[in-house]
C-alpha cells in the first residue's frame, strides 16, 4: 500500500507491520502520529483515562532501534496498542481496582510487551468508580454510546487513537462495543487467553481478547497473547494454532449453521435493519462458497438468563470482602451487580449451571454438523448517550440476546462489521466456532470482510 492512502493512525496492524518490517515506517513516527491524533480527538471521544505518552515514546524508540539492528520480533513489534482499565498495566492507575490491588503487568500485557507492542495507556470502561469521568462517545456519531463495558476500547480503535486494544468480555463486552463502533472483536475460547492481572467480574465467564480495525489484526494480537499461563488456574494447555493461516479468502467447503428459530425469537427485540444486514451477510457467505444450514439449539433461549445468574453470583462471591465499601462508595453498575448477586441464591446458581451443561451438549451436537455459526451481534445500532442510564446495560441480560450464550459456553466468537443503519451507525455479524477453533471463525470473518470491505469506511471525525 502507498503511504499516502490514509493517515498513519488509520493503518491497520497488518498494514503497519508490513511497513515497519520493511523499514518504510518507523515505530516512532507511527506512535507520534497516534499521540497527535489522541491530542486532537480524544477530547471529544473520552477513550483514555490514563495516557502513558512518555513511556510510549520510549518504547517506540527502543522498538525502532531493535528493528534497525535486524531484531524484528513479529507483527506486533512497534505497534501502538492500548488496554482496558480492567487489566493491570505497570505504572498506570487501575481505577476499576478501587478496593483491590493489582499485580503490575497482567500476563496478556506482558505478552504484548514481549511481542514488541507499544503500550499507549489505559482505556475507559463502564463500572469505573463515580468521579465525573465523561462517557466515551462513538466516533461514527458522538451523540451515541460505544457499547459496554469496553467503552474506551471501542472508541479508541475506531477513532484512530490506537491500532488495537485488549478488551474483556463477560457478557458481550468485547463484541458489543466492536459492533457499535464498526471494528472487529474476538472473544477467544475460555482458557485460551490468560486472565492473570484482570480485575474479576465472573471467574467462569470472563474472557480477555483483542479489538482491532480488521479481522487480520485480531489474529495477530491473539497470536501474541494466547497460550497457557501457570498463574491462571483456568488457563488451557491446548496448543496454540497459527492464526495467520486463517487469513485466506476461501470458505468453500465450510458449513455455516444459522440458529434461525432463535434469531426469530429475538426478532421482536431486534431492530429490523440488523436482521436484514445479517441475513445479507449470511447470503454473501453462501455466494462465496459456504454451505448454509439451519440448526436448532433447544435450550439457547435460557442461556442468557443462566449467564446473568452466574455472572452476578460470581461477582458477589468475588467481592464479598469489599462489598460494604462497594455498596457505600462504588459505581452504580458495581452496586447493582452486588444487589443482583444477593437476590439470586445458590439454588438459582445450580440451576443456571445445569442449563450451561445442557446448552454445551446441544452445541456439541450442532458442531458435529457445521463448522461455525452465524447470527447477529447486536439488537440494534448504538443508542443515544442521553437514552442510556448507568445500569441499563446490566438489564439487557434478562432477555434472550446474542452475547451471553457464548460466555456461558466459552465458545470463541468474532464480531465483523456487515453494514450500516439508515443513520450510518455500524451493524455487525457474529461468527461462533468450536472450542479452540478460532482459525475457522477468523477464516470465515476474513473472507467475508475482504468481499464486503466495510472496513474501508471510516468515522466522519
Image: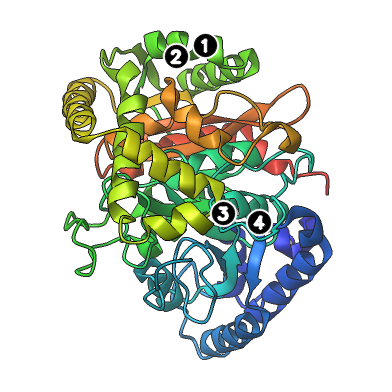
Please report the residue visible at 36 percent of the width from the left and 33 percent of the height from the top.
Answer: 308
The relative height of residue 358 versus residue 72 in the rendered view (above or below) is: above
**Residue 280 in picture, x, y percent from top left:** 57, 17
Upstream in sequence: badge 3 or badge 2: 3
Q: Is residue 253 left or right of residue 18?
A: left
Residue bearing the label numbered 1 = 267
Q: In this view, does 408 lie to the left or right of 52?
A: left
Upstream in sequence: badge 4 or badge 2: 4
User: Can residue 440 be seen at all in this image of the molecule?
Assistant: no
Pick whichever, 70 or 326, lies toward us: 326
The relative height of residue 144 versus residue 201 in the rendered view (above or below) is: above
SS at badge 1: helix
SS at badge 4: helix
Count of numbered badges drawn on the protein = 4
**Marks 1 and 2, how far apart at CA:** 6 Å
Q: Do the residues labelled 4 and 2 touch (CB within 8 Å)?
A: no
**Marks 3 and 2, how far apart at CA:** 29 Å
Q: Nearer the viewer, mark 1 or mark 3?
A: 3
The relative height of residue 185 versus residue 133 in the rendered view (above or below) is: above
**Which labelled disc corresponds to residue 125?**
3
Upstream in sequence: badge 4 or badge 3: 3
**Marks 1 and 3, how far apart at CA:** 29 Å
Q: Nearer the viewer, mark 4 or mark 3?
A: 3
Pick whichever, 417 or 244, lies toward us: 417
**Which labelled disc corresponds to residue 5?**
none
Q: In which quarter of the image is residue 32?
A: bottom right
**Marks 4 and 2, how far apart at CA:** 31 Å
Upstream in sequence: badge 4 or badge 1: 4
SS at badge 2: helix
Residue bearing the label numbered 2 = 263
Please report the residue visible at 17 percent of the width from the left and 23 percent of the height from the top.
Answer: 358
Please report the residue visible at 69 percent of the width from the left and 51 percent of the height from the top.
Answer: 136
Amino acid at each position: 500500500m502507498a503511504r499516502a492512502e490514509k493517515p498513519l493512525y488509520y493503518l491497520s496492524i497488518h498494514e503497519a507491520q508490513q511497513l515497519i518490517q520493511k523499514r518504510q515506517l518507523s515505530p516512532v513516527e507511527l506512535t507520534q502520529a497516534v499521540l497527535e491524533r489522541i491530542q486532537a480527538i480524544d477530547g471529544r471521544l473520552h477513550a483514555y483515562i490514563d495516557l502513558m505518552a512518555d513511556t510510549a515514546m520510549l518504547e517506540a524508540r527502543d522498538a525502532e532501534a531493535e528493528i534497525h539492528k535486524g531484531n524484528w520480533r513479529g507483527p506486533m513489534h512497534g505497534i501502538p496498542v492500548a488496554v482496558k482499565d480492567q487489566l493491570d498495566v505497570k505504572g498506570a492507575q487501575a481505577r476499576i481496582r478501587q478496593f483491590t490491588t493489582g499485580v503490575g503487568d497482567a500476563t496478556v500485557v506482558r505478552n504484548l510487551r514481549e511481542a514488541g507492542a507499544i503500550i499507549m495507556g489505559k482505556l475507559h470502561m463502564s463500572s469505573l468508580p463515580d468521579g465525573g469521568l465523561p462517557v466515551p462517545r462513538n466516533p461514527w456519531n458522538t451523540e451515541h454510546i460505544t457499547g459496554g463495558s469496553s467503552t474506551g476500547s471501542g472508541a479508541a480503535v475506531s477513532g484512530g487513537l490506537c491500532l488495537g486494544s485488549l478488551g474483556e468480555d463477560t457478557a458481550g463486552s468485547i463484541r458489543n462495543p466492536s459492533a457499535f463502533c464498526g471494528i472487529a472483536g474476538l472473544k477467544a475460547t475460555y482458557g485460551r487467553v490468560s486472565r492473570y492481572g484482570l480485575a474479576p467480574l465472573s471467574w467462569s465467564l470472563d474472557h480477555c481478547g483483542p479489538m482491532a480495525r480488521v479481522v487480520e489484526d485480531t489474529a495477530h494480537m491473539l497470536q501474541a497473547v494466547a497460550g497457557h499461563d501457570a498463574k491462571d488456574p483456568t488457563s488451557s494447555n491446548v496448543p496454540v494454532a497459527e492464526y495467520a493461516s486463517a487469513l485466506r479468502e476461501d470458505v468453500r467447503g465450510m458449513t455455516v449453521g444459522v440458529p434461525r428459530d432463535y434469531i426469530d425469537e429475538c426478532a421482536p427485540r431486534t431492530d429490523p435493519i440488523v436482521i436484514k444486514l445479517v441475513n445479507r451477510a449470511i447470503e454473501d457467505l453462501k455466494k462465496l462458497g459456504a454451505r448454509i444450514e439451519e440448526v436448532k439449539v433447544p435450550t439457547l433461549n435460557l442461556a442468557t438468563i443462566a449467564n446473568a445468574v452466574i455472572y452476578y453470583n460470581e461477582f458477589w462471591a468475588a467481592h464479598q470482602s469489599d462489598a460494604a465499601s462497594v455498596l457505600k462508595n462504588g459505581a452504580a453498575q458495581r452496586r447493582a451487580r452486588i444487589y443482583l448477586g444477593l437476590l439470586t441464591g445458590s439454588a438459582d446458581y445450580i440451576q443456571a449451571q445445569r442449563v450451561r451443561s445442557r446448552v454445551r451438549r446441544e452445541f456439541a451436537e450442532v458442531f458435529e454438523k457445521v463448522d461455525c455459526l452465524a447470527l447477529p451481534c447486536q439488537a440494534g445500532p448504538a443508542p443515544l448517550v442521553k437514552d442510556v442510564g448507568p445500569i441499563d446495560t446490566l438489564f439487557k441480560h434478562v432477555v434472550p440476546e446474542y452475547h451471553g450464550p457464548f460466555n456461558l459456553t466459552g465458545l470463541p466468537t468474532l464480531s465483523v462489521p456487515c453494514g450500516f443503519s439508515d443513520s450510518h451507525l455500524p451493524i455487525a455479524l457474529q461468527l461462533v466456532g468450536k472450542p479452540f477453533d478460532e482459525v475457522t471463525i477468523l477464516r470465515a470473518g476474513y473472507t467475508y470482510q475482504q468481499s464486503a470491505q466495510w472496513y474501508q469506511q471510516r468515522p466522519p471525525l
